[in-house]
Image (spheres, rainbow, N blue to C red):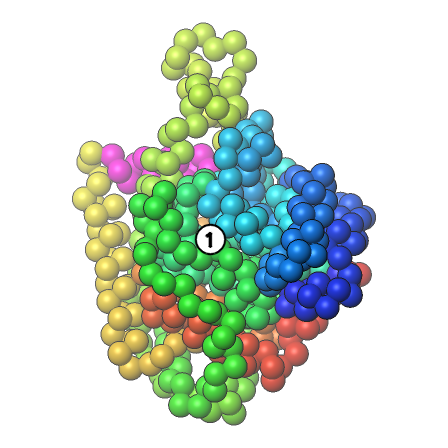
Amino acid sequence: MHQMTLAEIARGLADKKFSSEELTKVLLARITQLDPQLNSFISLTQELALEQAKAADARRANGESGALLGAPIAHKDLFCTLGIRTSCGSKMLDNFKAPYDATVVAKLAAAGAVTLGKTNMDEFAMGSANESSWYGAVKNPWNLEHVPGGSSGGSAAAVAARLLPAATATDTGGSIRQPAAFTNLTGLKPTYGRVSRWGMIAYASSLDQGGPLARTAEDCAILLQGMAGFDQNDSTSIDEPVPDYSASLGDSLQGLRIGVPKEYFSAGLDPRIAELIQNSIKELQKLGAVIKEISLPNMQHAIPAYYVIAPAEASSNLSRFDGVRFGHRCENPENLIDLYKRSRGEGFGTEVQRRIMVGAYALSAGYYDAYYLKAQKIRRLVKNDFMAAFNEVDIILGPTTPNPAWKLGAKNSDPVAAYLEDVYTITANLAGLPGLSMPAGFVDGLPVGVQLLAPYFQEGRLLNVAHQYQLHTDWHTRTPLGF
């Protein structure tokens, strides 16, 4: 049962080959047995899962149907869940139980999805390795000595290890796509505003976006269908009709124009990954796609711009965690200032403190124009590059990451080295574009991903290309040894 995809589970439930309750029990037992190796879960919601599974079975018995009805998933631990700990991977929120469900959680629950638990993550989604969590680092199931990527590494590791078929995740600078690449999954960051951020604890509000992590493009289409849609509670949500993502998976790629930016193949890219990307290009050409070299000249400025904008927004968003209303509070504060200082100093980890300090500095009176305003101007240039490129091509293709997953602790003493691993992913967040990573091969036994980018609200196009590619390759079917 644990090897089934979301689509196969939907068909099995519809054909009454097994019940949601039976499947849920199998997966909960598997998580209990195997997750101590991975540390991919922060909270396991066994009682809730069995209750939801029984309810889903009853709904099916009454004639209801739906791809997510009775399907087991997990939520990244920054989606608020009523009465269940929502920690953001931080000591600051270790004792926080959300008083409501995030819109994404509520929509998936209404569709009949079964919540198995909350997955581990980099603290407040700040990191590329899933090593900054208060609950300890997550391990990559492909090699337990390596990172699974971040910040959605818990969701990625759990799905890759076949602990469950799919999970929710979030992407601020690549935090869905990079873990997907590192763990041999398909991960989709939708257009900014496509998935509601209400109840999703913010890191950088103008960059954060929720999306699906699964083994196939077909599964991502199913999960995104349940997540997407306008939400009046979210002022950044866009009132745009949600198409049937599964309906376009079978479309032909004949004549599809694929742009390959020359800037992607620089000295920083592992040549073995470059070779795998070229192999992917050849495979898509066989399916009828037309390849064209393009240029994204301002890509080189994206990382410095991102690491001004994101910390600036984080310093503002995280100011609410002050030890007064909720979250961690220090013992016996002498006065209000002492309460603030010690609560925040004890509650936030090193990486979060680093980004708060950088953000506060960039927003300070003497430096706002020099740093934050200039970064926003660069952001516009990055967006303009994409708009010009999409006048010539239908999608853009390249590597998801410049290197395969590194060893645990390898970049802890040099945070900038970890930041540079986001070079191919952050541009989509700066521009608000949809992006997808899909499995493309292996280097030294570690998975490699190829990234696809599309114009606004063209998630269906990305899923179509990925699905057609997966019909003709088998990288996505490989399972890590021991899982």
User: Is residue 194 visible in the rendered structure shown here?
Assistant: yes
Residue, x 39% and y 28% (percent of image)?
A: 320
Residue, x 55% and y 64% (percent of image)?
A: 222
* Amino acid carrying mark 1 in the image: Gly
Q: In the rendering, at what x and y percent does residue 415 appear? A: 48, 48
Please indicate whether residue 441 sits to the left or right of residue 301 in the image: right
Classify mark 1: residues with Cα within 10 Å, few (<14), some (14-19) or many (20+): many
Q: Which residues are magenta?
A: 351-364
Name the residue that disc number 1 marks.
Answer: 210
Does the magenta segment cover residue 449? no
Q: In the rendering, at what x and y percent does residue 192 appear? A: 36, 56
Quadrant in the picture for residue 337: top left
User: Is residue 311 visible in the rendered structure shown here?
Assistant: no
Above or below 295: residue 311: above
Q: In the rendering, at what x and y percent does residue 212 appear? A: 53, 59
Q: Quadrant of the N terminus?
A: bottom right
Q: Nearer the viewer, residue 117 or 13?
A: 13
Residue, x 29% and y 76% (percent of image)?
A: 389
Q: Nearer the viewer, residue 82 or 468?
A: 82
